[in-house]
Every structure is written in structure tokens, then in C-alpha cells.
């Protein structure tokens, strides 16, 4: 799956159930690569918006956050992975308890921000 396509459509997946599902399906094959795993994880947390059952919402959110933390462990200095986790932390309801690494992620992003070459990634980061 093309990384620029993922970046360009990541925020659209919140509102577009079919896009979210399609991107998740495509990224499942790439989950050994930390950046792709991070996007898959972010989409898994977004999938909770597309489900009705509260248990399914929790399960998919938890699966996404677990995978996202694994992606951070695989590549702790990767700005893009930290951005994805930051976006999840800032948008998740606080009662879910997934917000404790906001400052750390913001610091990593700030440190490596000058190295960004992708305009679509820079646009996403500047929105958060």
C-alpha cells in the first residue's frame, strides 16, 4: 500500500467506513513494518467510530492501542509513528485512559519535525 495514499486519506477514514475498512485490510499484510503497523493501529482505533456494539468498540480500540504501542517500541524515534499515537491520544475520550504519552510524543515530533519530506505528513502534523 502506498504510504502517500495512507497519509492523504488517514483523516478521511474517521467519516468513511469503507475507506477505513479497505485501508485496514490492505495494511494487515504490511504489519511487520513499524510505520504501516502504526497506521493500521490508528485505523483500528478509528474503527470504533464505525461500530455500534460497545464491546466491539472497546475491543477494536484496545487492539489498536496495543498495536500502536508495539509500533512505538519497534521504532521509538520515528516521528510518523509518534504522530499517529499522538493523534489517537488527543482524539480518544479521556475516560479510556489513553493519553499518558502526549508530552513525550510531542517532544519527539518537535525534535524531528525539520526532517519531514512528505507534504501530506507535514499537513497532518500541523493540524494536530
Image (cartoon, rainbow, N blue to C red):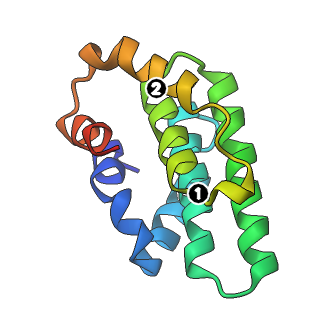
Where 125 falls versus 40 (above or below)?
Answer: above
Q: Earlier in the sequence, mark 2 or mark 1?
A: 1
Dot 2 and dot 1 residues touching (CB under 8 Å): no
Q: Residues within 10 Å of mark 1 (few under 14, many from 20)?
A: some
Q: State the residue position of label 1.
A: 92
Where 100 falls versus 94 (above or below)?
Answer: above
User: What is the secondary structure assignment of the residue under circle 1?
Assistant: loop
Estimate the x, y position of residue 69 in percent, counting from the top left: 69, 36
Q: Residues within 10 Å of mark 2 (few under 14, many from 20)?
A: some
Residue extending farthest to the left is 119
Q: Residue at x 47, y 18 (%)?
A: 108
Estimate the x, y position of residue 23 in percent, counting from the top left: 46, 63
Q: Which mark is residue 106?
A: 2
Q: Is residue 29 visible?
A: no
Report how many numbered discs are placed on residues in the image: 2
Residue extending farthest to the bottom is 52
Q: Quick check: 25 left or right of 79?
A: right
Q: CA distance from mark 2 to mark 1?
A: 16 Å
Q: Residue at x 54, y 64 (%)?
A: 46
Estimate the x, y position of residue 124 in percent, counting from the top left: 29, 44
Q: Is residue 122 visible?
A: yes
User: What is the secondary structure assignment of the residue under circle 2?
Assistant: helix
Amino acid at each position: 500500500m502506498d504510504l502517500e495514499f495512507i497519509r492523504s486519506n488517514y483523516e478521511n477514514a474517521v467519516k468513511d467506513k469503507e475507506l477505513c475498512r479497505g485501508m485496514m485490510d490492505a495494511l494487515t499484510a504490511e504489519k511487520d513494518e513499524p510505520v504501516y503497523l502504526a497506521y493500521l493501529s490508528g485505523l483500528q482505533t478509528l474503527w470504533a467510530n464505525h461500530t455500534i456494539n460497545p464491546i466491539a468498540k472497546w475491543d477494536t480500540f484496545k487492539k489498536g492501542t496495543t498495536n500502536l504501542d508495539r509500533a512505538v517500541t519497534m521504532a521509538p524515534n520515528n516521528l510518523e509513528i509518534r504522530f499517529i499515537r499522538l493523534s489517537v491520544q488527543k482524539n480518544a475520550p479521556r475516560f479510556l485512559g489513553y493519553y499518558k504519552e502526549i508530552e513525550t510524543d510531542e517532544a519527539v515530533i518537535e525534535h524531528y519535525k525539520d526532517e519531514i519530506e512528505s507534504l501530506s505528513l507535514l499537513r497532518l502534523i500541523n493540524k494536530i
